[in-house]
Amino acid sequence: MNFEILGKNIKRLRSASKLSQKSLAVAAGISLPSVKLIESGKASPRMSTITAIATALNAALQDLFVPVRELHTVRFRSNRKMQNRESILATVARWLDDFNSLEEITGERVPFKLKNLGRRKSSGDIIKMAECCREALGLRSTEPIRDICGLLESAGIKVFPIQMGSDGFWGLSIGEEDNGPAVVVNSWERISTERKIFSAAHELAHLILHKDAFDVTRQEESEDEERQASLFASHFLMPNESFRKEWDEAFGLHPIDRVLKVKRIFHVSYKTILVRLIENGKANNSIFSEFQYRYFQRFNKKLAFKEEPQAESIEPAGLQKWDFYEDRLSRLTRKALDNNKISLARGAEILGISIDEMQDLLKNWEAVL
C-alpha cells in the first residue's frame, strides 16, 4: 500500500470538500494528529480508519488509493483563492486518461487540426488568426457556430464540461504534452450558456496563441494574454463582417430587441455585442449603462451584473443548456460497450454514473426513443 498516494488523495478530497483537518478528524472519529500524519504519508493507518475517512469524505474507497497523474501544460483561469484547484486538476487528469483510452480502444483518435496555426500578437493579427481558425475548421465567414463542442472535438480538441459550484472558476486548457489538447469549462447551472460558449472559445485561443505559456504552477494569468484570448473568442464566434450584416438588417427593431436578436444568432453574450459596437465606432463605453437603462424601461426589471437577458419580446428564446453540450465521450463509451471492449462497470466509471444508471442508459440506447 502506497501511503504517500493515500495521503495526497485524502488531502485533495478534503480540500475539495472544504473541510479542515480538524473537521475531518471529528467526522472520521480519529485524532487531529492522526489526520496530519496520514496526509503527510508518514502513517500506516488501519483499513477501518481509511474506511472511516472515505465515508467522511463521501468518497469511494478506491479513490483514496488510485494515483493521480500530474498535469504540467495547463492554463487555469480562476480566482487565486481557489481552494479545490488540485482536486479539479486530478478530476481532469482522470477524465483525459479515460478519454484517450477510449480513443485507442475504438480507433477513433482525432488529430489536432489547428496545431500548425502561427502565433500573432497585435490586435489586428489576432482577429486575422480567428478568421484563419474558422477557415481551417471549414466555417464560412458568415456562418454562426451552432455547436461549439462538436466543432472543437472535430478538430481534435477534447471538451470537458465540469460542474463546479463557483463562478470564480471559468475554465482551463491543456496542451498536447498532457494528452490534450483539451478545454475544460465550468458548466455550473448558474453560469449562463453564453458564458460557457465564450469560455470554450477563449481556451481555444490560448491553445493557438499562447502555446509556450502553459504552466500548471502559474498562479496568475497575463492580462495581455487574457485580452488577446477574449478578442480572439469574440471574432471566432462572431466575425465582424457577419455581425455588421445582421446588425444592419435589424435596423428597425427596438434597440434592446436588436441586441438580443443578434446575440442569439451568434450564441454570444449581450456584452460581446456591446463591445463589438464600440470596436466598430458605433458607441462608446456609456453603452453599458444605456443598455441597462433601456432594458429596465422595456421589461420593468433590472439586469444583474452576471445575468444574461432572455429574448422576452422576440423569437427565438434564450439559449438553453443543449446549446453547450459535449457528447463525444458518451459516443465513444457506447461504441466500446457495443464491441465488448469495456465492461458495463467501466462504462459507468467513465461516464461518472452508477451501474443502475448505466444499465438504464443501455436500455434507452437500444430503444432509440
Image (cartoon, rainbow, N blue to C red):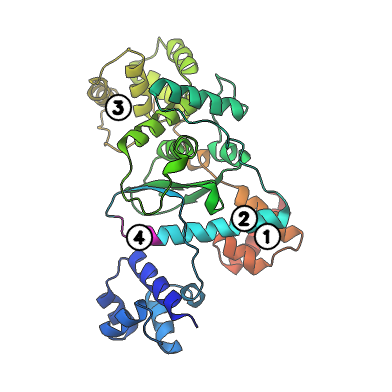
Q: Is residue 23 visible?
A: yes
Tell whether label 4 touches label 3 (CB within 8 Å). no
| Helix, strand or loop for disc 2 | helix
Q: Nearer the viewer's eye, disc 2 or disc 1?
A: 2
Q: What residue is disc 2 on?
A: 100
- Mark 1 to mark 4: distance in Å? 33 Å
| Helix, strand or loop for disc 3 | helix
Residue 25 spot, x, y in % from top left: 29, 81
Residue 212 spot, x, y in % from top left: 45, 42
Q: Nearer the viewer's eye, disc 4 or disc 2?
A: 2
Q: Which amino acid does label 4 sit on?
A: Asn
Q: What residue type is labelled 3?
A: Phe
Identify the residue at image location x=72%, y=54%. 106
Chain-order first, disc 1 or disc 3: 3
* Label 3 CA crowd tier, 10 Å (few <14, some 14–19, many 20+): few
Q: What residue is disc 3 on?
A: 299
Q: In this view, does 16 lie above or below 195?
A: below
* Label 4 CA crowd tier, 10 Å (few <14, some 14–19, many 20+): some
Q: Which amino acid does label 2 sit on?
A: Asn
Q: Nearer the viewer's eye, disc 2 or disc 3?
A: 2
